Every structure is written in structure tokens, then in C-alpha cells.
């Protein structure tokens, strides 16, 4: 698997959408299906982690900002 820090959120989403499009349009070879589903799962976990991290960062910033009064 690729380094999670090297994959940007938008790139991960675009890759997930591409995998889904291939599956929906039956463009994917059955032999590749398992690997692509695993890749999509990895990317979904990465997106979830990035969203969670961003949420925590924003909460910290907002807390620090409200304490600057």
C-alpha cells in the first residue's frame, strides 16, 4: 500500500469513484475485483481518518480562538 500521507483526500475520493464506476459499468475483470475492493476499503479508511483529523484540528483552533478573548 502507498504511504497514506502521500495520498490527498481529493485524490482518494476520485480513485474510489473510479473504482465504483468500473464496478457499476461491469468494466472490471473478476480477477481484479478483490484487489480493487481492498483498495477502495483502504482509501475509505484513509478518507475517514483525514476527516477525523481535520475535525479535531478545527475544534482545537476554535477552542484556542474562543480563549483569546
Image: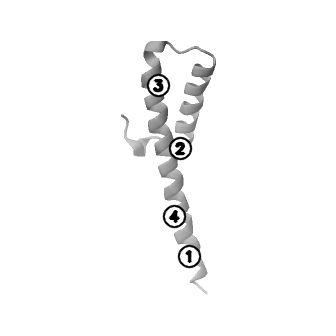
On screen, residue 4 above or below 59: above
Disc 2 to disc 3, how far (Cα)?
A: 18 Å
Using the image, tell me which numbered label, if any, was put on residue 36: 3
Q: Residue at x 44, y 37 (%)?
A: 42
- Residue 8, image x and y in percent? 50, 43
- Which label lies toward us, 4 or 3? 3
Using the image, tell me which numbered label, if any, was put on residue 23: none
Q: Secondary structure at mark 3?
A: helix
Asked whether the beta carbons under mark 4 and mark 3 sit within 8 Å of each other, the answer is no
Q: Secondary structure at mark 2?
A: helix
Residue 68 falls in image quadrant: bottom right
Residue placed under numbered mark 1 in the picture? 63
Using the image, tell me which numbered label, if any, was put on residue 57: 4
- Relative horizontal placement of residue 25, taking residue 56 as reference (left or right): right
Q: Secondary structure at mark 1?
A: helix
Q: Residue at x 47, y 28 (%)?
A: 37
Residue placed under numbered mark 2 in the picture? 9
Q: Point out the tag, 1 or 3, that comes first from the N-terminus.
A: 3
Q: Point out the tag, 4 or 3, that comes first from the N-terminus.
A: 3
On screen, residue 25 above or below 65: above
Q: Residue at x 36, y 34 (%)?
A: 1
Look at the image and tell me in which quarter the C terminus lies.
Answer: bottom right
Disc 1 to disc 3, how far (Cα)?
A: 40 Å
- Which label lies toward us, 1 or 3? 3
Asked whether the beta carbons under mark 2 and mark 3 sit within 8 Å of each other, the answer is no
On screen, residue 10 above or below 37: below
- Residue 21, image x and y in percent? 61, 23
Amino acid at each position: 500500500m502507498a504511504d497514506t500521507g502521500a495520498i490527498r483526500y481529493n485524490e482518494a475520493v476520485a480513485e474510489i469513484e473510479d473504482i465504483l464506476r468500473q464496478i457499476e459499468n461491469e468494466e472490471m475483470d473478476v480477477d481484479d475485483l478483490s484487489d480493487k475492493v481492498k483498495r477502495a476499503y483502504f482509501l475509505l479508511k484513509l478518507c475517514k481518518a483525514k476527516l477525523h483529523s481535520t475535525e479535531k484540528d478545527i475544534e482545537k483552533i476554535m477552542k484556542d480562538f474562543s480563549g483569546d478573548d
